Image: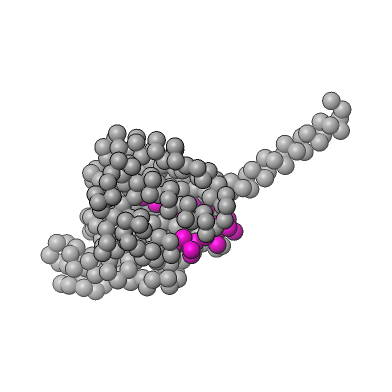
Amino acid sequence: MTFLNRFLLCFILISVNVFSQKTQEAYFKVVPLGTKGGIDEKNLSAYLLAPLNTNDYISLDAGTIHSGIEKAIENKVFKVSTNTVLRKFIKGYLISHAHLDHVSGMIINSAADSSKTVYATNKCMEMMQKHYFNDETWVNFGDRGRGKPLNMYHFQTLAIDEEIAINNTSMTVKAFPLSHGNPFESTAFLIKNADNYILYLGDTGPDIVEKSNDLRSLWAIVAPLIKTKQLKGMFIEVSFPNEQLDQFLYGHLTPNHLMKELHVLEELAGKDSLKGFKIIITHLKPPVNNIAKIKAQLKKQNDLGLKIIYPEQGKRFNL
């Protein structure tokens, strides 16, 4: 091989490596505090999300908080105390719906928490104020509602499709409706930092079962962001394997229903637009054999070239 050929080969290898690094560049960091859909109270839906070079986290749902932080400290994700993460790093909570497996960690830890904002749609906020922070079931740590509000949490009601700033972070959020066992409501959050986005979906059933257009409407909104590669990843639930009958889904997804929905998204975003796109699977329901089935079925049915991520409690990953 001549010197010129060697030089060209080295140049090509370096160029490919640089290009690969650019295409894999991360913009957000995620620390899962809880990943399951039940029955382990130490591992329920909660994901800390922050811009890559900050510790300004928002908690996407809050089923498990304290145990998840402890697990992250064990894994050396955080080199500070549990109290510091809870009080200083977590800047607020985005709550998709008021089911206990999505809010219990926030409620239990509220007595040790610092002042911050809880964000939710009107229906979800009403349920939390009526049933939890009501000075009966639990002390009212909020700034409105029943009993004597202690004004520690600011309850921020989110209007649908209205972008607002997430306090004490550089991020913004828009809320969109989801159907979670019609007529029960859930929420999707489109989070933005600079020109980059993350989509987080709370519990949701497929449109065909829910007799809804909520997911298709959401896909139409995010399809342009997929085309431009600005959407860096999507958190979406798969609670049951394909063997679960539709009448017993209770507002959840199976691998089959997820892939059908994502095919609708690809139709809107363009052919091969989801190739390599990161899908973070949330809310897998025990037992273990069901979770194994879900993973095997998703692997088999992944004809879109998705990069499927199964988050582990206390283990950070980047998007």
In this picture, residue 259 sits left or right of residue 178: right
In the displayed orientation, state which residue is furthest to the left.
136
Asked whether 156 falls inside the magenta stretch, the response is no
| Residue 45, image x, y percentages | 32, 50
Give the residues drawn in magenta, as a range.
Answer: 218-237
Asked whether 231 falls inside the magenta stretch, the response is yes
In this picture, residue 306 sits left or right of residue 315: right
Please identify the quarter of the rendering in which residue 148 is found: bottom left
Count of number-bearing discs: 0
Q: Can residue 169 be seen in this view?
A: no
Against 288, residue 28 (above or below) is: below
Please identify the quarter of the rendering in which residue 196 is found: bottom right
In the displayed orientation, state which residue is furthest to the top.
1
Against 33, residue 140 (above or below) is: below
| Residue 217, image x, y percentages | 43, 65
Q: Which image quadrant: the N terminus?
A: top right
| Residue 175, image x, y percentages | 40, 66
Against 306, residue 292 (above or below) is: above
- Kindly identify the residue that appears in the image at 17 percent across and 62 percent down: 138
- Kindly identify the residue that appears in the image at 48 percent across and 63 percent down: 220
